Image (tube, rainbow, N blue to C red):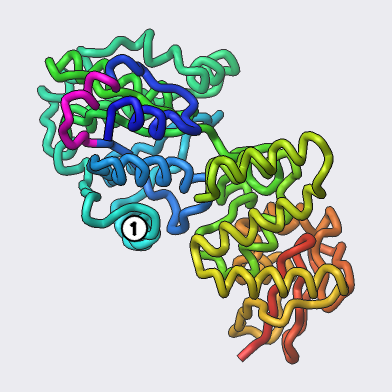
Amino acid sequence: MEVEKQLQIIKSNVAEIISEEELVKKLKKKRHLRIKLGIDPSGSEIHLGFSVVLRKLRQLQDLGHTAVIIVGDFTGMIGDPTGLSKTRPKLSREQIKKNMAKYKEQILRILNPEHTEFTYNSEWLGSLTMFDFIELASKYTVARILERDDFSQRLKQGIPVYMHEIIYPLCQGYDSVAIKADIELGGTDQKFNLLVGRELMREFNLEPQVVMTLPILEGTDGVRKMSKSFGNYIGITEPPAEMFGKIMSIPDELIIKYFELTTDAFPHRIEEYRTALREGSINPRDVKFELAKTIVRMYHSARAAQKAADDFERTFKKKGVPKHIKEYISKKKEMGIVDLLVESGLMHSRSEAKRKIREGAIDIDGKSVKDIGLKIKLQKPIIIKAGKHRFLKVKSR
């Protein structure tokens, strides 16, 4: 494919390329480029927010390039401080290995396995001697590291910044040196780390990688970035009905962004939706309905998408309960409502469960729950409704 055509495809829905001129030079060499994506598998489930960068990586694979997934089994034990106002909890190698087994299967739902390499950064970072690390550290200044917004804000507020956090960008940057990356992808919040890799490659007399950042996708709350820790995520392996319901709950102003960043819908179709929404000639709910069907089809099947759509219509037009809802079987005959919401997976944390109960977002068998200390008897099955679109049948053994 001609370089201009490749560039047009690559630039679609990208926030920034540093630099486009260098990217063109790499493309003109007409060789397979090595596209780096680093991940520290802090959980076991991939959500639509993470799919944004994976979809761009697949696009690059389809142009003939190679995806190199760097699994941060070394950096995960440090913890990426990006965007945090406190020190991130460190992961053990056992946690990382367990999480990665599930991550890999999900990643390969999007990427082409034949053009994907998986490698672990402990292979090179774990073998560095203290002498090697001193040499690496000499190639970047403390002042530049502390330019990071999260570090500078923490220092202003008197919140500690630990030494292991300062070395994180160096370690991630050295990954680019180790694999001789041509391009590195990441969210806009990763720009600093990606640029460190670019500078370190120069220091090691390598052609610097091109940095390509992708927009951050807001979660179902429409405010914060999609994250499991915020409870606003849509997992790509979630059951069709649950996935459909969550997508229908996103704010109307995010419909087009979700279409652009998370679906395979044709660009001209997205433009038609954008124009119709702007002119008010279409109901946003109808466009969101098509968005939900599209995403469910992508990760399940056309049949599953239609079934989820029919179920949604029946449930929310007739105010009923879906025919097909997820089940949770408890070993206990009685549980506190907070424990039940967390253990069943409806809520990610006890604090989220308590907040949702206080907001009046939890119903049991059609009755609103407001007491966070409520004990639930499970002698017979119950139906829990969380928010507008999530249902769960709970019963005991």
Which range is magenta? 24-34
Residue 139, image x and y in percent?
21, 13
Residue beneath the point at 57% across and 70% down: 239
* Pick the front one: 343 or 173: 173
> In this orientation, does residue 155 appear?
yes
Quarter-of-image position of residue 27: top left
Quarter-of-image position of residue 183: top left
In the depicted structure, whether residue 255 falls above or below residue 147: below
Quarter-of-image position of residue 388: bottom right
Residue 151 drawn in magenta: no
Residue 109, image x and y in percent?
38, 60
Residue 62, image x and y in percent?
31, 46
Q: Dividing the image into 4 quarters, which one contains the N terminus?
A: top left
In the depicted structure, whether residue 384 falls above or below residue 7: below
Q: State the residue position of label 1.
A: 108
Q: Secondary structure at mark 1?
A: loop
In the depicted structure, whether residue 5 falls above or below residue 367: above
Residue beneath the point at 64% across and 75% down: 307
Residue 348, image x and y in percent?
61, 57
